[in-house]
Amino acid sequence: MNILAIETSCDETAIAVLSVQGVFKKTFSIKAHQIASQAELHAQYGGVFPAMAKREHSRAIFPLFVVALKEAGLYKESAGSAIRTEQLATILAREPEVLEYILREMPKIQKPNIDRIAVTVGPGLTPALWVGISFAKALSYIWNIPLVPANHMEGHILSVVVPDGSGTFSAKEITQRLPSISLLVSGGHTEIVGVKGIGKYELLGQTRDDAVGEAFDKVARMLELPYPGGPHISRLADMARAQNSESIAPLPRPMLHTPDFDFSFSGLKTAILYLIRDLGVLSENQKMAIAREFEDSAVDVLVHKTLKAVKKYKAKSILVGGGVAANKELRTRLTHEASLLGIPVIFPTKTLATDNAAMIALAGYFEKPAPLTSDKFIAQGNMKLR
Ligand code: KG4
Ligand code: ZN
């Protein structure tokens, strides 16, 4: 089965083709993996603007789709076939630019060997989600290919089952790891999810204010580092560790000992704001020291609460997902602490950790198709895992 997947929930337009073969033992291989990032554009504003994200998705999505089809070897030119257009204007009412592309370019493309289309319907930025959803509906309509809704967070959870972009696993291999605790850490989310099975999730805790990636980005901004700030903070923090310097000022560990699995990162951010205000113009060494204090504090609470959830849930593994899963300190500390309990921590590979469409194809593989008129294809900015 070939699955075409479309992801536009935040600032990455992503299209992937995933091939799934086999009956008991499934082989997953990524045939196309295209990402057009808007990060540089949003960088100058220090965050993602929904209206701007939507505009960029509308511009990027059709050309990226053609590149993905070519990468998967599924692109064939057509001499100019007639396409179904009756309902296209309605389906793409929100996306005039995409409609224009489709009317001009689609008659030149032969229907590809795709069995299913998956699209992210939430959570994310609503105007951005709509671009992907409208485009996916249009493709499904024109080529008569079943469409499935996918949850972005489920995609992050499942992204750890496809190591290196391709892999095999059997149902037994998955159940051996379950129940599992998933730590989802990105620019928009900080969640601890209990995973009883694929499609069987329980939200155990989440951030009450900023997401941890957002906190990394905001602290980076205070230190005049580029957006997205996570990797830059991490780099400076590592340099501080290498120097083995003294702590510049110990920061709080917000909600470390609360009896729940919730997080709060906005206080940490404010503490750093005051620290910077007191220090005045920062030297490079001071920036490194602050980055380290912040990273240590954030990682402390993430690791502590995740392990607490592991014990309570009697989990057999930890699955990490989201952009912050790339953080080296988090990886090292979580792996070490989990090894003391004798359980593995599974991280997505670099290409699958940040937003991408291969993970959406995976989520879509485990979902059922729905009719185009279904309310499942309405953007759900605050969609929850069920
Ligand atoms: O999952 P993602 O690509 O996009 C969403 O937010 O959905 O995550 C992006 C976030 C950004 O906040 C970025 O600063 C953070 O992940 N990030 C990191 C690292 N790499 C990316 N945070 C800490 N350490 C990193 N190495
Ligand atoms: Zn994400």
Image: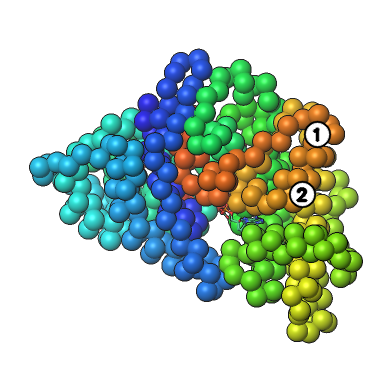
Local packing at callout 2 (Cα closer than 10 Å; few below 14, some 14-19, many 20+) is many
Mark 2 and mark 1 lie on one chain; the one further toward the N terminus is 2
Q: Which residue is mark 2?
A: 302
For the C terminus, give its image quadrant: top right
Q: Secondary structure at mark 2?
A: helix
Foreground residue among 302 and 280? 280
Residue 51 as seen in the image, left or right of residue 68: right
Residue at x 73% of width, y 49% of height: 330
Circle count: 2
Q: Outermost residue toward the left? A: 79
Local packing at callout 1 (Cα closer than 10 Å; few below 14, some 14-19, many 20+) is few
Q: Quadrant of residue 16?
A: top left
Residue 191 percent location from the top left of the image: 68, 47
The amino acid beneath tag 1 is Ser
Ligand 1 within 8 Å of the CB at mark 2? no
Residue at x 78% of width, y 73% of height: 285
Foreground residue among 27 and 82? 27
| Viewer-side label of 2, 1 | 1
Residue 24 percent location from the top left of the image: 50, 15
Residue 365 as seen in the image, left or right of residue 316: left
Q: Is residue 7 visible?
A: yes
Quarter of the render that holds ligand 1: bottom right
Q: Which residue is mark 1?
A: 339
Q: Which mark is residue 181?
A: none
Q: Secondary structure at mark 1?
A: helix
For the N terminus, give its image quadrant: top left
Q: Is residue 210 visible?
A: no
Q: Outermost residue toward the top? A: 24
Q: CA distance from mark 2 to mark 1?
A: 16 Å
The amino acid beneath tag 2 is Leu
